[in-house]
Structures are given as C-alpha cells and as structure tokens.
Image (cartoon, helix red, strand yellow):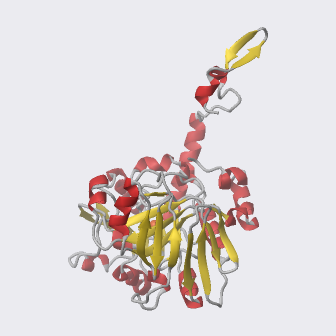
C-alpha cells in the first residue's frame, strides 16, 4: 500500500474520523536536529577530517587539484597544513581525468612527502604506486570530498576507525595459503568467478588499505577521504606480479545499475571470459548502449563499500560505498560517446564504466564475505564492540541512509 492509498482511509477517533494521510509520521520522532546536536555532529566530522590528513611538521605537501573542486575544500586542507607550518604547492588542472602525471609535474611531485589528489591516475598508475612504495609518500585521494558541505554528511562523521575495523574483519575472512575462487552470485542468476592464487590474495591483503589503515599516517599510506571506498576485492595492480597476466575471470553478472544510467528495468547480462566482456544480453535501450560500450572491456577493479552511512543508493560518481554493495569497474576498449554526453564533467574518464549491485553474495573459497548485499563483517563481535563505543551498534552499522 502506498501513501496515496492511505488518503482514502480513515482513523475513527472519539466519534470523528480523520484521514490516515493526515497523521502519517505522528508515530515517529521529529527528523529535525537541535542546532546543538548539529554542532556536535559537525565536529565529529571535523575530528575525522583532521586525523585523516595527518600532516607532520616538516612535511612537503603537493596538492594535485582540478578547477571543478570546491575551492573551500582546498582552503580547509591548506588550513590544516598551515597549522603545521606547511605551505602546500598547488598543481591545478582543468580535469580530474589525468591518466598519468605530466612530465613537468614529476619533479614537483617527487619532492613531496604528503600528496592530496583528485587525479584519476593516483590509485593505480605504476608511477604513483612507486612514489608511495619507494619514497614512502602518504597520499589522500579526495574523490569523495569535492564539496566542503560534505562535512555535514552522515558518512563524514561515521567513526573512521570503524571503517578500518570493517575492512580488517572482511580481510580476515579470506582463506590464506592456498588458491581460492572468488564467487559472485545473486537471485537474478549472476554467477561470476575469479580464480585467485594464494600469492594474489597475500599481495592484495598486504596493502595498507586492506590492513584497515584509514589515516594518512604511516609511510606509503594511500587512503580515501571521505573514508567510504574500501579496498578492492579484485584489482590487478596490487595482486599481480606481471600486469600482462590474464586472470581467468569468467561467468555472467546481472548488474542492477551503472554510473551514468537509471536503474536497469530489465535483466541485463554481462558475460566475461578471461577477464574480458564477450557478451551483453538484453533488449532494452540501456542494454544496447552497454553492448556497444562494454564488449572487449576488461575488469580492472571490483570495489566494495565499507561506510555504513554512505547513502546506500547513491552510485555517483563511482559506485555505492555502502557496505556490501559492489561496483565492477570496467575499462573500455575506447572512450564512450554515451558517457561524454551524459557526464561531460565526470570525475572518471569516459573509458571507464562502473556496474553496480546491491544484493550480491560473495564467497572467497569456503568463506562468506557478503550475503545478498549485506557485508557479513557488520555482525562481527570486534566490529559491534567497537561500534558500541560510539553509539548504538545496530543504528551505526545497519541503519543505512537511502
Ligand atoms: Fe572504485
């Protein structure tokens, strides 16, 4: 029954009757927060913010920014740096879609000890990875902090260390010391498998993100702020010794949605062979567009959300970051005109597509990571105990905003 159906229904009351529609919500607490509560919540977010950007006296900070980034975000971060006597060097480009670090920028970047970046190549480009690995640079990617007003969001004030604990609890579920298969299934009939060697699992889980490090504190750190995007269940960069290795990803997923689209109205099948997309089934216009874009594309990232207060069904700009929701990151054979038209200012390049699911079951070998889109680690005792320090665990961990 919808709210419009309630309009015709009556509540008999003391000889009168009132429309049920008129009393909707009267059994619920007021949604309005007191100003004092809002201030308290804001400073929780500010504390997370200050701790994540763990500047140390003597740091050399380089800021890789773009002109569509809220200037107030830059000021907030340079303000934190100024409190440590640090004067960041700004490198401003016209777009986040930087596929590599320009040669002119490299001498500047190489002097950094701390990098704040909006640039796309930051996560995966071997040059950027080497700067962290070999020089110990600490990096914060701010894809999810492009507007200062986000400090007022629920995901900004969610306890940062609890995101880390959820990551660690999920990492602990991976079988170690043997080859395993990552398996993705759902009620639509999806059945995708990614065979992982013990070494691939070890290498992936040894990254600072899978260790649950969420602050840019230790040498080589790479963290997202806001802390929403967790480490990836599958990602060639940290997993493979040789990036030319063909991973035998195979099977079909039926994504529910993709960034740049409305939720799919039909069952669209995306079939993989040897990590590349070989078939897209479906009759709808969306299926036709995806077929045109995706055939020949390869899986380069299988991301999972880890912040329970990220709006569950907000998938822009790069997939939902709610725990247990997945995004299958595909690199296309060529840039897609569809993306250029729909999202000309997208933070990711038009050669990338994120396919999203909210109800996938994920098994790593004999162990369960996610059940029907619910991250199993949300129920772990260590996670619940830590959540209890901050508030009501069920509210913090399982009460997801839409
Ligand atoms: Fe991602």
Most foreground residue, 285 or 125: 285
Q: Nearer the viewer, residue 391 or 248?
A: 248
Residue 125 image offset from top left, x and y in percent: 36, 78
Q: Is residue 20 among the parts visible in the rendering?
A: yes
* Rendering quarter of residue 292: bottom left
- 328 with respect to 324 (left or right): left
Instruction: Please identify the quadrant where the N terminus is shown.
Output: top right
354 is higher (above) or lower (below) than 114 = above
- Does any portion of residue 60 appear in the rendered image? no
Residue depicted at 70% across the width and 79% down the height: 366
Query: Would you identify the image quadrant in which residue 203 lies?
Result: bottom right
On the image, the x and y values in percent for residue 171 come to: 63, 76
Q: In the image, is 352 to the left or to the right of 303?
A: left
Residue ranking furthest to the front: 283
> Where residue 372 sits in the image (x, y, percent)?
64, 61
88 shown above or below 207: above
Badge count: 0
Left/right of residue 201 with respect to residue 150 in the rendered view? right
Along the viewing direction, whichever of 248 and 87 lies nearer the viewer: 248
Extreme right residue here? Answer: 14
The foreground one among 100 and 276 is 276
Q: Is 56 on the left-hand or right-hand side of 362?
A: left
For the point 31% across and 65% down, which residue is it?
349
């Amino acid at each position: 029954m919808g709210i419009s159906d309630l309009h015709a229904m009556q509540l008999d009351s003391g000889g009168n009757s009132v429309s049920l529609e008129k009393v909707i919500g009267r059994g619920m607490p007021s949604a309005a927060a007191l100003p004092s509560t809002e201030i308290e919540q804001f400073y929780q977010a500010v504390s997370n913010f200050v701790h994540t950007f763990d500047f140390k006296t003597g740091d050399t900070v380089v800021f890789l920014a773009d002109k569509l980034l809220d200037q107030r975000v830059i000021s907030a971060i340079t303000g934190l740096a100024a409190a440590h006597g640090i004067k960041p060097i700004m490198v401003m480009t016209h777009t986040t879609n930087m596929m590599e670090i320009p040669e002119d920028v490299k001498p500047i970047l190489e002097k950094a000890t701390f990098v704040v970046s909006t640039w796309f190549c930051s996560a995966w480009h071997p040059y950027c990875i080497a700067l962290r690995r070999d020089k110990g640079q600490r990096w914060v990617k701010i894809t999810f902090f492009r507007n200062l007003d986000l400090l007022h969001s629920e995901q900004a004030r969610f306890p940062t260390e609890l995101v880390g604990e959820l990551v660690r609890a999920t990492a602990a579920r991976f079988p170690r010391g043997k080859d395993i298969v990552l398996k993705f299934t759902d009620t639509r009939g999806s059945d995708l498998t990614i065979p992982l060697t013990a070494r691939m699992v070890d290498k992936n889980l040894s990254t600072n993100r899978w260790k649950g490090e969420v602050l840019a504190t230790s040498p080589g750190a790479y963290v997202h702020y806001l802390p929403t995007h967790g480490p990836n269940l599958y990602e060639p960069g940290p997993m493979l010794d040789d990036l030319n290795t063909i991973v035998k990803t195979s099977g079909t997923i039926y994504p529910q949605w993709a960034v740049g689209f409305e939720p799919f109205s039909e069952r669209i099948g995306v079939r993989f062979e040897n990590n590349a997309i070989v078939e897209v089934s479906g009759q709808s216009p969306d299926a036709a567009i995806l077929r045109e874009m995706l055939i020949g594309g390869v899986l380069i990232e299988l991301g999972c959300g880890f912040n329970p207060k990220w709006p569950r069904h907000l998938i822009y700009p790069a997939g939902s970051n709610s725990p247990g929701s997945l995004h299958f990151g595909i690199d296309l054979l060529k840039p897609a005109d569809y993306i250029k038209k729909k999202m000309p200012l997208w933070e990711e390049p038009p050669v990338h597509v994120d396919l999203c699911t909210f109800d996938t079951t994920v098994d790593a070998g004999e162990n369960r990571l996610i059940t029907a889109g619910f991250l199993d680690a949300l129920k772990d005792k260590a996670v619940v105990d830590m959540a209890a320090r901050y508030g009501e665990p069920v509210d913090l961990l399982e009460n997801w905003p839409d």
